[in-house]
Amino acid sequence: MANMLSISFGVGIAAYGEARFDTWGVILQLGAVAFEATRLVMIQILLTSKGITLNPITSLYYVAPCCLVFLCIPWIFVEYPVLMETSSFHFDFVIFGTNSLCAFALNLAVFLLVGKTSALTMNVAGVVKDWLLIAFSWSVIKDTVTPINLFGYGLAFLGVAYYNHAKLQALKAKDAQKKTQEADEEAGRLLEEREGGGNVKRTESEN
């Protein structure tokens, strides 16, 4: 919890130091983060529920229709009227096709990562994605980055680095425990075989 709070605090400082701060934009972004976190937690529950084993393809098979329904509702009321008013709009199969393939690959990767790790790891990875977007806007678009931004990014980076270190140490400890357990089981099996062989020899000698 302390690690997650440090990452959130760093992101908050970076947002506060934004040169062109927009309150409505921050509210929309926070809402998007909250809904995305809820979606990832629900995906983890779907993939790891007791008695249910779903691979990424099967999960996408069940989730995609729901996403289509919920996306169609705002599209009808928000984007469709704008498209009808724009006479120059035409359906481009290449653009829509490549976008669809990218979205399919992205959702497949999300399901795979959440199934192998956790929703928390996916959310932490999203912070790295935000850094890449900010670095791109800073280097290519020449957007302004203030010292407060850099301090917030650095603090969040330290939190993410510590989280990855803790996860790595936990995986190493789990592997070591598994190897120790396997070695103990192998030693117990060998001991049983030796004891069984000794009993057979003792019985033969008595006969």
Image (cartoon, rainbow, N blue to C red):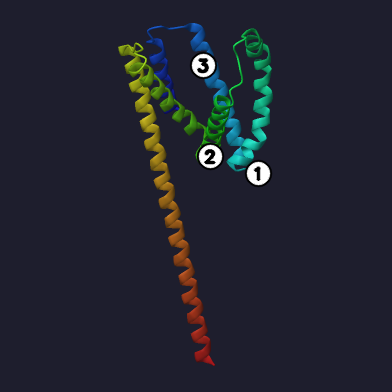
- Give the residue pinned by disc 2: 112
- Give the residue pinned by disc 3: 30
In the drawing, does residue 153 fall left or right of residue 87?
left
- Secondary structure under badge 1? loop
Instruction: Identify the residue shown where x is 66% and y is 26%.
Output: 68
- Secondary structure under badge 2? helix
Whole-number angstrom distance, CA of label 3 to CA of label 1: 32 Å
Residue 14 placement: quadrant:
top left
Return the residue nearer the eye: 97 or 165. Answer: 97
Q: Is residue 6 visible?
A: no
Q: Residues within 10 Å of mark 2 (few under 14, many from 20)?
A: some
Q: Residues within 10 Å of mark 3 (few under 14, many from 20)?
A: few
Q: Disc 1 residue type?
A: Ile
Instruction: Identify the residue shown where x is 45% and y is 53%.
Output: 178
Residue 161 placement: quadrant:
top left
Q: Residues within 10 Å of mark 1 (few under 14, many from 20)?
A: few
Whole-number angstrom distance, CA of label 3 to CA of label 2: 25 Å
- Give the residue pinned by disc 1: 52
Q: Position of residue 119 (x, y in %)?
A: 52, 33
In the drawing, does residue 95 fall left or right of residue 83?
left
Instruction: Identify the residue shown where x is 69% and y is 24%.
Output: 69
Q: Earlier in the sequence, mark 3 or mark 1?
A: 3
Q: Disc 2 residue type?
A: Leu
Q: Earlier in the sequence, mark 2 or mark 1?
A: 1
